[in-house]
Every structure is written in structure tokens, then in C-alpha cells.
Image (tube, grey):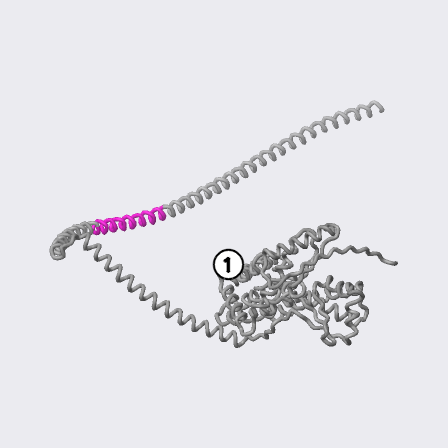
Amino acid sequence: MSTAWILIALVTLIFGVALGYLLNRYLLKDRTARAAEEADRTVRDAEKQAETLKKEALIEAKDQILQMKQDAEAENKERRKELSQLEQRLGQREESIDRRAEGLDKREHQLSSQQGQIAKREKELEDVIEEERQRLQQLAGMTADEARSELMNRIQDDVKREAATFIREAESHAREEADKKARNIVGIAIQRVAADHTAESTVSVVHIPSDDMKGRIIGREGRNIRAFEQLTGINLIIDDTPEAVILSSFDPVRREVGRITLETLIQDGRIHPARIEEMFNKAEQLVSQQVHEAGEAAAFEANVHNLHPELVRTLGRLKFRTSYGQNVLKHSLEVSHLAGVMAAELGVDGTLAKRAGLLHDLGKAIDHEVEGPHAVIGADLARRMNEPKTIVHAIEAHHADVEPATVEAVLVQAADAISAARPGARRETLESYIKRLEKLEAVANQHKGVEKTYAMQAGREIRVMVKPDQVNDTDAVVLARDIAKQIEDELEYPGQIKVMVIRESRAVDYAK
């Protein structure tokens, strides 16, 4: 039973294995067939896709080739059109050149013909001239050169005569017109500008409360008056004039400082050498301030702006300067106004003319310090202060030290002459007197060891202050004789001049 079952199981197993093997081979064959079929289909699809891509690429390449061909044809067409236009222009230009060449040929032919006619006419004229020349020579008895020379001389004489007549008439007319215009302008300027003229005096009178004050001013053994005169450089005259003393000096600045000093001392009542020196220093500061204010006031009155401070101070010093008795600052203001009025009448720059007129006499404020004409000194100062070249030139040309080259320079020159020519404006004697006193001081200042020099007693005495460490007592005697000798040789003066050399030593200390 068990054997039968075993056999049955074995047969079943064998049968199952065989059936499985057969099924497996069938299934494998079927799968292989399907895979091959799938592969064939894929290959066919790929071939179809490749064929499609190939056709599309061919179509695209054909389109590009066609587009390129169309572009090339369009470009060729455009170039052919340009070449056609160029050929047309060249043809037109060639026709134009041909026409011009034909015209030139015709012109050349005409010119040749005209040259022939001209040459023929010239020959005929030469023959006629030669015949006339020979006939004139026969009639006049002169050669052609002689006749030509005679004719030229006559023509030259006629031309010179006519030119001289014309020039004379033109100059006369121009002079009359210029004189008329100038008189009109000067008359207008003089009428519109008028300045007060007062002759400066060389003395100042200081009133005192009583005659007893004279003794205090003189001091014990004259020490106060000596100290006052040595400090200020002016002559203090105390005489029988009731309740008055007189200050005498040719330099108005010194005289003003001395006047203020003396008046302050009289008001204070304390008069001694130390107090005199203290009041003198204060008076110098006050006068310096007045100088600055006078310069600013003059610039404001003349409407001249942006002046350098040094020019303002120098201008203010002219308040105490006189020329031929005429106050130089007032004179400068008048010249400024006159030049401005004349410039306005002539239609030129009145601002420059007024500025130049105000500054034209700057050199007179420092001509005792610098050698040379005051016009040149003033021009150098203005140049250093960066004044315009026109102003500098007008200053240095107002006394013809240089030739005036601008309208402003001529106007300043004319205004200066007008201001000086007014009746009572100047006084020759005073200027000569001041020049003589200045020369006296200049002679003494030339010597070694001299510290200060003052001309006193209206020029009849000169006081020379020397440096005690450089000049001893013996040298002082020799110095006095040398100065007197030089004054005799170089100056002209009435009477005699006393030369006084003063050597003074001071010891100063302070109690604290």
C-alpha cells in the first residue's frame, strides 16, 4: 500500500517536474518572442523618428539656404542700385567737366584774341606817345626826363601847398573848437567847485589865564622852556603880549603838537620837565589820531573808497602840510572835485579821475624823508600800496616828470593848475621860507652823531641834538663849526644863523 503510494507520488512528482519544465520553456519562448517583437517595434519607431528628424533638418536647412539666397540677392540688388547711381553721378560729372573744358577752351581762345588786340593797341599807343614826345621835345626844347622831372616838381609843389593850407585850416579850426570846449569845461568845473583858501601862518598864539603863568612856563632858570623847545622842536616866544604866548615853527605838525602840549599843561597847572614830556607824548598820539581821521574824512568827502590804510594816514598828514601857503589836503580835495567834474563833462571815468586827483600830492607828506620830486615819491608809494597803474601814472605825470599818456593824467594836471591859479591860493614867499628851513635841518642831519635838528627863530638859529655816546664835548665844538661852514657854502640867507649843538646826558630811574 505504501509502495503504491510511493510510486504514485513519484510518478506525480515526475509528471509535475516535466509539466513545469514544459511550461517554463513555453513561457520563456513566449517572453523572448514578445521581447524581440518589442525590440523590433522600438527600432522601427526610432527609424521613423530619425527619418522625421532628418526630413525636418533638411527642410530647415533648405529654408536657411533659401533665406540666405534671398538676402544675398537683396544685397546684390542694393549694390547694383548704388553702382548704377554712382555711374550716373560719374556720368553727370564727366559731362560737366566736358562742358567746363569746352568753356575754358572758348575763354582761352577769347583771351588769346584779346591779348592780340591789346598788344596791337599798346603798339599803336606807344607809337602815338613816341610821336607826341618827339613833338613836345621839339616844341619845349627839353628831353622826356627833364619834362618829367619838371612836371613832378610842379605837382609836388602844388600838393604841398594845398596840404599845408588844409592842415593850417584844420589845425586852426580844431584849436578853436578845442579852446572853446576846454574853456567851457574849465568854466563849469570852476563854477561847480570852490574851496576856501587861507594862507597858513608859521606861528600859533596860545592864550593863558594870566601873565603869572608866563613865569611858570619859563621855569626856574628857564628849565621848563628849554625842555619844551627841545622836545617839540618849536620856538616858544614869551614877550610883553598880554595873556598870550607864541609858538613859532615852520612845520605845522610840530606846531600843532606843541600847541596841544602847552594848552594841556596850562589847564593842568603842573609844569615841569617830566610833565612836559608826558603831555608831549599824549599830544603826539592825539595828533596821530587827527591825521588818521583827516585822511578818512577827505576820502569820504571825495567819494574815494578802498584806500590802503597807509595811504589814508599819509593823506591825513597833508592836513598839516602847506605848499606856497596853500593847505595841501584842501588843495588835493579841490583837485579831486575839479578832475571829477571835467571827466564827467568829457564822458570819461570820473571815479579814476577823482581818485588820482585826491592822491596826486601824496609825496608832499613824505618828501622830507625821501629824496626826489614829490610826484615821483607819491607815485612810488601808490605803486607799493597796489594802486592801479592809471592812478600811479596820473600821480607821477601831474608835474610833467613823465609825459602824460592817459586822459586822467591830463585832467589831474589841469585840475592841479586850476586849483593853484585861484586868486589867493598860493604864496611864493612862504614856500621859499619853508624850503630854506627844511634845508637848514637837512644840512645838520647829514653829520654823524646827530639825533634831532630844529630850525628856530624863523631860521636865524638851528639847534642840533647829538647822541652823547657818539659825540663828546670836543666833537660838539667841531660839529658846530662844520655845520656853520656847510651852511655858508650851500645856502643863501639874510643876516646870520646861529648854530647851537646840544649834548645832554640823562640818568633815569624809577621809585617803586
Vertical position of residue 367 compared to residue 290: above or below: above
Most distant residue in the right direction: 512
Rendering quarter of residue 227: bottom right
Is 79 displayed left or right of 255 in the figure? left
Number of numbered tags placed on the structure image: 1
Q: Quadrant of the N terminus?
A: top right
* Residue 232 appearing in the image: yes
Q: Position of residue 6 (x, y in %)?
A: 82, 24
User: Which residue is at the front of the view, 244 or 329?
Assistant: 244
Majority secondary structure of the magenta segment? helix
Q: Secondary structure at mark 1?
A: loop
Residue designated by label 1? 402
Rendering quarter of residue 135: bottom left
Q: Is residue 237 magenta?
A: no
User: Which residue is at the front of the view, 14 or 413?
Assistant: 413
Residue sitting at 61 percent across and 32 percent down?
Answer: 36
* Residue 278 appearing in the image: no
Is 430 displayed left or right of 63 in the figure? right
Is 136 displayed left or right of 281 in the figure? left
Q: Position of residue 98 (x, y in %)?
A: 25, 49
Q: Inspect the image, locate mark 1, and give the three-letter code of the amino acid beneath it.
A: Val
Report the magenta residues as a range.
80-107
